[in-house]
Image (spheres, rainbow, N blue to C red):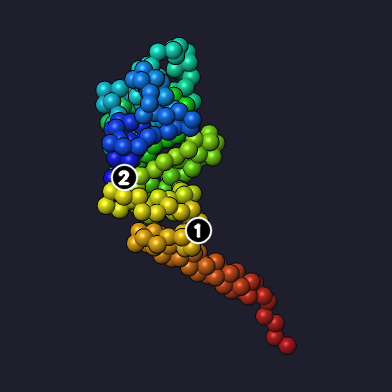
Amino acid sequence: GKSTLLRLINLLERPDAGRVHLGSRELTALKPAELRRERQRLGMIFQHFNLLQNATAAENVAFPLRLHAGHSRREIDARVAESLALVGLADKADHYPAQLSGGQKQRVAIARALAPRPDVLLCDEPTSALDAATTGELLATLRDINTRLGVTIVIVTHELEVVQALCQRAAVIADGRLVEQFDVADASRHATSPLGLELVRLQWRETRLAALDQSALETSAVIAALGRREVRHA
């Protein structure tokens, strides 16, 4: 139900009951034309990039801007350049998806989602197709976007390491139901579900490893200091 939840937020799927609000606007009450305008406030990043294969990185980023009227060619070019620079791909503007690595493709997808300047970025398992090193780089990019632009990020993932590295607040879905919510920093006090408790164990392991690394560093410093002492014989 995780990906379904994202599709309900931007109304790619309609809820059987209840309402969806984005800020003060009730999306479920809007007419189609109004909903299209409001959707520009919601950026979407897909698990498998969903890039146009016969379009360059710049053309992919420009696509949502050209889809909606009201943007001049100059404004589109400026936003494309700005978005690609933000994700560190200014030098890949003329490259096609086949010429890019998996991590670079995902960053093009992020730039495309950011080009309309959304208030919220919806991420559907954006790291699932990436290796560990590339995942770390992508999470750093998302943290930078959140900090610099103030964009709210809603990320769906089954990787607890992603939650620990990126998220301030977590919600656990099990069997299609929202079972709990908590601040990630306070997970040890509030998490009760099996998945929430697994996050607590991950946090404990990381804290323990950090303490061991610090202890080893201090020991090395002591040994190095002892090694610099002069030994004199009477």
**For the residue marked with disc 2, what is the amino acid?**
Lys
Determine whether 54 is above or below 132 in the image.
above
- State the image coordinates of residue 57 (x, y, percent, origin top left): 36, 26
Q: CA distance from mark 2 to mark 1?
A: 22 Å
Q: Horizontal placement of 59 versus 217: left or right?
A: left
Is residue 53 visible in the rendered structure shown here?
yes
Residue at point 40%, 50% (across, down)? 171
Q: Which mark is residue 186?
A: 1
Task: Please give the residue where the numbered disc 2 appears in the rendered image.
Answer: 2
Q: Residue furthest front?
A: 17
Q: Are marks 2 and 1 in contact (CB under 8 Å)?
A: no
Q: Residue furthest bottom?
A: 234
- State the image coordinates of residue 202 (x, y, percent, origin top left): 41, 62
The local secondary structure at tag 2 comes to: helix
Nearer to us in this view, 129 or 218? 129
Which quarter of the picture shows residue 22?
top left
